[in-house]
Amino acid sequence: MKQITARPKVLLDVPMHYCPGCTHGVAHRLVAEAIDELGIRGRTIGVASVGCSVFMYNYLDLDFQQAAHGRAPAVATGIKRVLPDRIVFTYQGDGDLAAIGTAEIVHAANRGENITVIFINNAVYGMTGGQMAPTTLLGMRTTTTPFGRDARQAGYPIRVVELLNTLRGPAYLARVALAGPANIHRARKAIRRAFQTQVEGRGFSLVEVLSTCPVTWGMAPVEAVRWLEEHMLPEFPLGEFRTPEAREAVLVPLGGGGKG
Amino acid sequence: MLMKGNEAIAEAALRAGVQAYFGYPITPQSELPEYMARELQQRGGVFLQAESEVAAINMVYGAGGAGARVMTSTSSPGVSLMQEGLSYLVGAEVPCVIVNMVRGGPGLGNIAPAQSDYFQATRSAGHGDGRLIVLAPSTIQEAADLTILAFDLAERYRNPVMILGDGILGQMMEPVSFPPPLRRERDLSWATTGAGDGPRRLINSIYLDPDELEQHNLRLLEKYRRAQQEEVRWEAYRMEDAVLAVAAYGLAARVARSAVDRARAKGLAAGLLRPVTLFAFPAAAFREAAERVRAFLAVEMSAGQMVEDVRLAVEGRVPVFFYGRLGGVVPTPPEVLQQLEQVAAEVAR
């Protein structure tokens, strides 16, 4: 009998604390698969951030640092700079990365910091109970936008990948969705490619992962996936926005450009 | 050699084997990152100018948690921004060194030397129940020596250590000598090095269960108690037969020393008790001195912050007077002498 699938070695066999239908479990597994496939378990350090996924370190058999809210890219920078042969990744939610941690993510990306960022966008603050996120859609009801997000009062959803794609630093930028087997398969490839980018020393990589939060959205899990497809995909288009090859083709050589 | 204080601290850190420096420019300490940018990278270390003090202290957290000897430096407004990170560093027990070249406040204040961050440095490391170990140099040689000590204490206690200097200490030049580069045997069995050679490691400050968090806090408290036993440092100057004692640290202590000499020349038996460790405060030395002197005069470049620790130590045995200049104004020896004479008249009454 041929075994075609198994729990990734780096993914610990323990119950997760996530709500029913939450996609963190899927995203964790995809990260674990990438680490297994690239054979980097013995040299990978994770940075967990504030949000539901702060306990990620309970589920992956890796060294972990827990960062203050929004600061994971700075923490990862500190680790990577002193241990350049290690693989360092952050796992951050939308409030963490795109609100309180905006400066840290923009500057880590702009420095081309050789780290990998897994960015979970579920359009809402999950752990604190369903408040508006920077990525909350216009018209979407949350506990702090009870009448729906109004751009005049609360601005627009931030498109993180497009924002970072204006910088010259990043090597790999992609947006994927945890909605249906085909999309999850593409997400798996993108996350693996992001880690591969770091392993090859090519610079900053980030994968935005459109995810569901059925409990704070007030939906059944299957309904939540449908809602993601219908409402989030038009706002947040999927695809690879930047690849290392495309970047290196137009890049000014490192250390060049200035006088003298 | 003759060096600026900021550069002497940087060189001392290099001799202590600092492996990484993260910081954000702010006056009056920018010579320190500039020195590091030149020298640390050439000696195989990591220098990175962060996008903010918030990011810098979190880079320190990452690098320190990964086992590197790491430091940052800043001045008062920058330390305010680092409070969040300091709390996490203390909670997760990550060793590091922070240099605060204090300037006048509050708010943007000015760039003149001050001692108005004493409370911020000694009372709490950000939110929560954590503490910093705080060292206060008075000369440039002492700044260099205490920098080396700071790295050792940070690792011994797995706690951030702050060098608290009055801004001018970074700017002025004095002769200084350094020990040869040090090699320290370091226990990194706790650090997240990603070596994958044993059980996974965690740098963390979250304990959801209140009982667990209480136990964690009690462990931290035990470390501070140990520091209060073993790491207290102070200097007593002409205290043997002193009737009046000045309490002062850092730059104010230099002024006070001169005032003590002038008082002695006029026949007034004054002495100086100078805390070198602000946390742990040399409370026993003050308590003991209170048995012999008639009064204390605390002299600070603040509205009166260290004086609270003096009063706590003295516990009402003798009166504690206070003289402070604010906003970056440095008191002069004649001013302090005049205060001493007033105190002498007061206690003679």
Image (spheres, coloured by chain):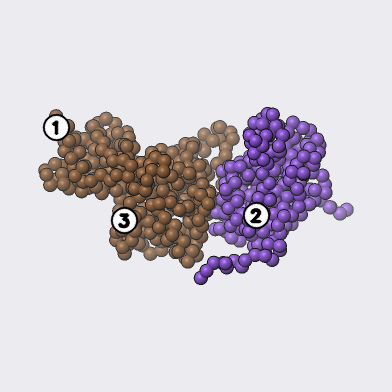
On the same chain, marks 3 and 1? The answer is yes
> Does residue B206 appear in this view?
yes
How much space separates mark 1 and mark 2, taking CA atoms?
75 Å
The residue at the point 43 percent across, 59 percent down is B34
Mark number displayed over residue A166 = 2
On the same chain, marks 1 and 2? The answer is no
Give left or right: position of B338 versus A72.
Answer: left
As drawn, the residue found furthest toward the right would be: A1
The residue at the point 80 percent across, 35 percent down is A223
Look at mark 1 in the image and give the residue it sits on: B348
Q: Chain of mark 2?
A: A
How much space separates mark 3 and mark 1, taking CA atoms?
39 Å
Look at mark 3 in the image and give the residue it sits on: B172
Nearest the eye: B155 or A147: A147
Q: Please name the color used to draw chain B.
A: brown
Nearest the eye: B113 or A231: A231
Q: Nearer the viewer, mark 1 or mark 2?
A: 2
Above/below status of B337 relative to A109: above
> Does residue B276 appear in this view?
no
**Do labels 2 and 3 touch, CB within 8 Å?**
no
Q: Amino acid at mark 2?
A: Thr
How much space separates mark 2 and mark 3, taking CA atoms?
44 Å
Which lettered chain is shown in purple?
A: A
Q: Amino acid at mark 1?
A: Ala
The residue at the point 56 percent across, 58 percent down is A81
- Mark 1 or mark 3, which is nearer the start of the sequence? 3
As drawn, the residue found furthest toward the front would be: A152
Determine whether the residue tagged by mark 2 lies in a helix, strand or loop. loop
Determine whether the residue tagged by mark 1 lies in a helix, strand or loop. helix
Q: Quadrant of the N terminus of chain B?
A: bottom left
